[in-house]
Amino acid sequence: MIPLLEVTDLVRSYGGGRDFLGRPKPKFHAVNGISFQIAKGETLGLVGESGSGKSTAGRAILQLERPDEGSVRFKGTELTILGPQRMKRFRREMQIIFQDPYSALNPRMKVGRFVAEPLVVHDICSGSTLTDRVADLFRLVGLDPAFMARYPHEFSGGQRQRINIARSLALSPSLIVADEPITALDVSIQAQIVNLFQDLQDQLGLAYLLIAHDLGMVRYLCQRVAVMMRGRIVELAPTEAIFSDPRHPYTRSLLDAIPIPDPDRKHRRHIAFDVAANIPAREAQMKEVNPGHFVLEQ
């Protein structure tokens, strides 16, 4: 079976070239040769500390930033070679939800128009059909369609993120890249949004690439987890294998950082992993240590 998304040796770098004195400028590889697949209806968690390259990888997969090297195949089609017109068709099936629900909304645009915009751009529907479709999307994410005539400043953070989710669903996508979708929300609202993601996947058969810091949410939502460090995936495995049998020291250090709400429970601490001293080499390969469990050679 062809995977919904197949990423192979993806590279995205910044810098390079020469400065105004003609001196070479260093090149920084934000994503340095990552590979993974996502099946239809699957949720893959992409975790790692800030600056590990997670968000850059998500944008490169969606071709919001063109990768330097590597392959991104969606439903068997290579996206990296497509021009804007041919890519537009695939953008209907690949959507993104950004981290900050406040800056993602246009403050001068009523939220109903904001959700309707993808349908207008892709010439899907208009008039009363458009209004009805947007109302259905509001109901789908748990919002009253009467809110369509309001502006973003009239909503809470959780409601704004529901509006962003409604917009991402407007074109009936197969894959959603969710970039830290609950980080900017109050703790009391985060569980509601996580449950909404699960409900939408059950109803619509969505696949998610879930970029996250919250390992609790990752454990709840994801079937597999990819751990990213300094532009490389250092471990990729089924979710429970990551949490019960982490093999890479960086993965263990991330799990050690999870607080345990039990003062009487002893928490084993591993030796702190020095990321700066252990930058993965580009030529390092993933090794399968158990079925479906891959670890980057050290």
Image: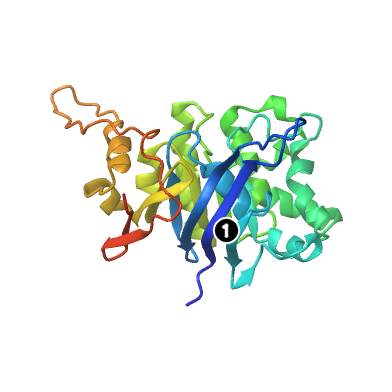
Task: Pick out the residue farthest to the top.
Answer: 263
Q: Position of residue 116 (x, y in %)?
A: 77, 48
Q: Left or right: where does residue 253 sit relative to residue 229?
A: left
How many marks the image carries: the answer is 1
Please tell me in which quadrant of the rendered image residue 151 appears. top right
Please tell me in which quadrant of the rendered image residue 103 appears. top right
Q: Nearer the viewer, residue 225 or 155?
A: 225
Q: Nearer the viewer, residue 242 or 127?
A: 242
Residue 172 against residue 278 in the figure, above or below: below
Task: Tell me the residue that label 1 is attached to.
Answer: 175
Q: Left or right: where does residue 177 sit relative to residue 115?
A: left
Model colouring: rainbow
Q: Which type of secondary structure does the marked residue at label 1 adopt?
A: strand
At 42% from the left and 49% from the top, the residue drawn is 281
At 74% from the left and 62% from the top, the residue drawn is 87
At 68% from the left and 47% from the top, the residue drawn is 167
Task: Pick out the residue farthest to the bottom.
Answer: 1
Residue 95 against residue 89 in the figure, above or below: above
Q: Position of residue 209 (x, y in %)?
A: 51, 52
Please tell me in which quadrant of the rendered image residue 283 appears. bottom left
The reply to whether residue 139 is in sight is no
Residue 261 against residue 84 in the figure, above or below: above
Q: Position of residue 164 (x, y in %)?
A: 64, 41
Residue 28 against residue 137 in the figure, above or below: above
Q: Identity of the amino acid at label 1? A: Leu
Task: Pick out the residue farthest to the front.
Answer: 22
Q: Left or right: where does residue 247 sit relative to residue 229?
A: left
At 17% from the left and 22% from the top, the residue drawn is 263
For label 1, count other residues whose C-alpha is less than 10 Å away and answer few (under 14), some (14-19) or many (20+): many
The reply to whether residue 287 is in sight is yes
